[in-house]
Amino acid sequence: MDLFMIILMVLVFVFLAKAVIIIPQGYNYTLERFGEYRHTLRPGLRLVKPFIEVIGAKVNMKENVIDVPSQDVITKDNAMVRVDGVIFYQILDAAKAAYEVNDLKRAIVNLTMTNIRTVMGSMDLDDLLSHREQINTKLLGVVDEATTPWGVKVTRIEIKDIVPPADLVESMGRQMKAEREKRAQILEAEGLRQAQILEAEGKRQAAFLEAEARERQAQAEAKATDMVSKAIANGDVQAINYFVAREYVTALKDMASAENQKVIFMPLEASNVIGSLGGIAELAKETFADKK
């Protein structure tokens, strides 16, 4: 009797262990009856018929990430590049993911690699390097549509690395260096042009000021000459002394500044020159007195 009870308790325990299933959050289990799919079990505590119904597949419903292995791709202009990427996907239908395709992850990876070769092979290398976002979008549309019958939603495909051949990288480096040098030369030429414009503007302004100064000096000399001429016409001896002193001083200046003259010997009566200068002062004084 005791042995029977023990056997019965063991059978009850085994029955309950087979009948009660706890499904964790983020997973769906498929239920099979005699090998045939019946329905999908959601997260929580579930009861099944032991020995008649069994769990078929345990499907992860969370978003998953798969690395796409590196592969060589020949572009439209016959350049070979090495490309890899990453896929983000989520299973929406556990039954389709379990029964419509064998080895879901491998199928998604192979499908993506094939479409990478197709999409990138239709583009030139320059477009390949500069339109990565466009490539990602095109791949996403194609792969997501192809995986829909498998109950999968591909949320994102990202191309991680596009590696051109070493000789092509070196050639691109030389090209970039030449472009930088060209831009530097253009900036330097522009700077020189601006400097020349500013210098020409400065010279023009200086020439204008010099001409204006000469004009004012000429006006002053003309006015002084006119004033002295009137004084001479009136018989003023001091005006005559002014002209004599001015010519005398100018002659001395020219003789002293001559390069072939080292030593000058000449008689100089300082009192006469001073007297002439005094005549100039008297002339100016009389002129200002007349104006008052």
Image (cartoon, grey):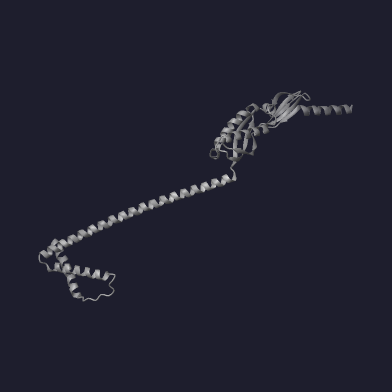
In what quadrant of the picture does the C terminus appear? Answer: bottom left
Q: Nearer the viewer, residue 256 or 240?
A: 256
Q: Position of residue 56 (x, y in %)?
A: 73, 27
Q: In which quarter of the view is residue 129 placed? A: top right
Left/right of residue 205 with respect to residue 280 in the rendered view: right
Q: In which quarter of the view is residue 134 placed? A: top right
Q: Is residue 68 above or below residue 30?
A: below
Q: In which quarter of the view is residue 14 placed? A: top right
Q: Nearer the viewer, residue 87 or 43?
A: 87
Disc tally is 0
In what quadrant of the picture does the N terminus appear? Answer: top right
Left/right of residue 249 with respect to residue 151 in the rendered view: left
Which residue is found at the position 43% from the left and 49% from the top? 187
Q: Is residue 87 above or below residue 211?
A: above
Q: Position of residue 64 (x, y in %)?
A: 65, 35
Q: Nearer the viewer, residue 26 or 205?
A: 205
Q: Is residue 266 above or below residue 126?
A: below
Identity of the residue furthest to the right in this view: 1
Q: Position of residue 139 (x, y in %)?
A: 59, 33
Q: Nearer the viewer, residue 190 or 223?
A: 190
Identity of the residue furthest to the front in this view: 78
